[in-house]
Amino acid sequence: MIWILILAYVIFLIIYILYSLAALYHLREFGFVGDACHTVIILYSAIAIAIILLSFILLFSSI
């Protein structure tokens, strides 16, 4: 049963990473000079990495 949850989590994580890469690509390609794109890229990357690391810690501490 736990393996089904881990598989679902891995699928979710792959989709989340692909979504994040698409978001960062669009910010980099279609952002305007002088707007907050670079700040948003840094903040979004930091938050996404924190979410992924925290979820790994929570997942593997419960196994």
Image (spheres, grey):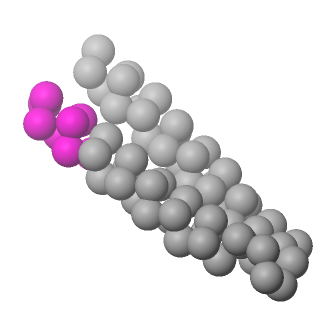
Q: Specify whether residue 58 is painted magenta.
A: yes
Residue at the far front in the pictured view: 34
> In which quarter of the view is residue 10 placed?
top left
- Is residue 11 left or right of 3 when viewed as pictured? right
The x and y percentages for residue 24 are: 68, 67
Q: Specify whether residue 61 is painted magenta.
A: yes
The x and y percentages for residue 61 are: 11, 36
Q: Is residue 15 above or below residue 29?
A: above
Q: Which residues are magenta?
A: 56-63
Q: Quadrant of the N terminus?
A: top left
The x and y percentages for residue 36 are: 71, 71
Q: Quadrant of the C terminus?
A: top left
The x and y percentages for residue 34 are: 79, 82
**Which residue is found at the position 86% from the left and 78% from the top?**
32
Q: Nearer the viewer, residue 47 or 32?
A: 32
- Is residue 40 left or right of 31 when viewed as pictured? left
**Which residue is found at the position 83% from the left and 74% from the top?**
31
Can you see residue 25? no
Q: Is residue 55 above or below residue 35?
A: above
> In which quarter of the view is residue 25 placed?
bottom right
Q: Nearer the viewer, residue 38 or 16?
A: 38
Q: Nearer the viewer, residue 40 or 1?
A: 40
